[in-house]
Amino acid sequence: MAEFLSFLLTLMRLSLVVFLLPFFEGKTIPRLVKASVCLMLTLAIFPSLSLKASSFPAHPFEIAMIMVSEILLGILLGLAVRFIFAGIRTGGQVIGFQMGFSMLTLANPSSGEQEGITSILLYQLSFTVFIVANGHLYLIKALTDSFDLIPPGGLVLSATVGQEILSLSLTMFVLAIKVAAPVMISLMLVELTLGLMGRAAPQMNLLMLGFPVKIAVGLVFIGMLFTLMGQRMEQLIMSLAPMFSTLMKAGSPLLQ
């Protein structure tokens, strides 16, 4: 019975992280596939990383508290990864608004929500780079390392954990600005140029001229942004382990 509960705790932490990943959300991936992925990951790391049966508490209340701790920890780790892709989506939304695509929305197949076309484009690009650059392997490695700092049931909720979450949320907005900045600056220069043209030749129909020019310039800079996005995603992938390590140290009972 203790071995089964130990396996269940390991499964709870991993499954919550997997289910909170942006590319596992929505209904595009069947729940059976998600559950199978969680089960295979748990079976792979359970023998060496799970809580030993000899140290498992006997009281039902203590077992319930350990399960709650694993649920909270899984949510924290899942949010840390979601912040990265949320920053890219936010940057895409800003780019679309600047290009005049604010009314052009499509159904995102992964989330099922209405999103801007540029947001979906940049998200799909970042997800492709994430898989090609073995980001999923770095993520699994970071998850397994989390068991060294915080054993099952060992999460300590402190003010430091809240500060780390706020810091990660700030990183989301910084990433959105970095993604959208090249296109925003180029479109701002286009707006400035159109404004000067309007002053020099008031008879020109700048409204009809401005839309295609802004869209063309925006698409050109989005194409140039692809290379920068690849480099940025590689940096984010390499920072997964340090990011998880910092978050784990904030809630680790070994470092309190």
Image (spheres, helix red, strand yellow):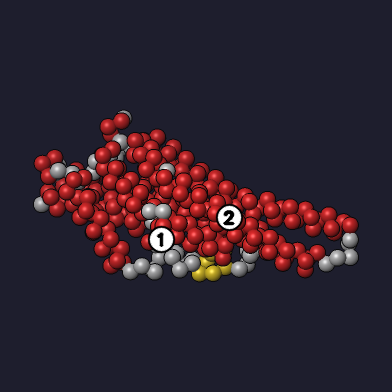
Q: Which residue is mark 2?
A: 225
The residue lying toward the viewer, choosing from 220 and 142, is 220
In x, y percent, where is residue 68?
27, 47
**61 lies left or right of 171:** left
Residue under the image location 40 percent in, 41 percent down: 243
Question: The residue tagged with tag 1: helix, strand or loop?
Answer: helix
**234 lies left or right of 102:** left
Decide: few, some or many residues near mark 1? Use Cα within 10 Å; few <14, some 14-19, many ≥20: some
Decide: few, some or many residues near mark 2? Use Cα within 10 Å; few <14, some 14-19, many ≥20: some
Disc 2 versus disc 1: nearer the observer: 2
Label number found at residue 85: none
**67 lies left or right of 93:** left
Q: Is residue 195 visible?
A: yes
Identity, as a three-letter code, of the amino acid under mark 2: Leu
Residue under the image location 26 percent in, 63 percent down: 36
Residue under the image location 57 percent in, 48 percent down: 178
In x, y percent, where is residue 155?
29, 40
Q: Is residue 71 visible?
A: no
Q: Is residue 137 above or below residue 104?
A: above
Q: Is residue 116 above or below residue 195?
A: below
Identity, as a three-letter code, of the amino acid under mark 1: Phe
Label number found at residue 23: 1
Residue under the image location 47 percent in, 51 percent down: 233
The first of marks 2 and 1 along the sequence is 1
Mark 2 and mark 1: span between their CA atoms? 22 Å
Q: Quadrant of residue 199?
A: bottom right
In x, y percent, where is residue 188?
71, 53
In x, y percent, where is residue 190?
74, 56
Asked if the residues shown at circle 2 and circle 1 are in contact, with their CB atoms under 8 angstroms apart, the answer is no
Question: The residue tagged with tag 2: helix, strand or loop?
Answer: helix
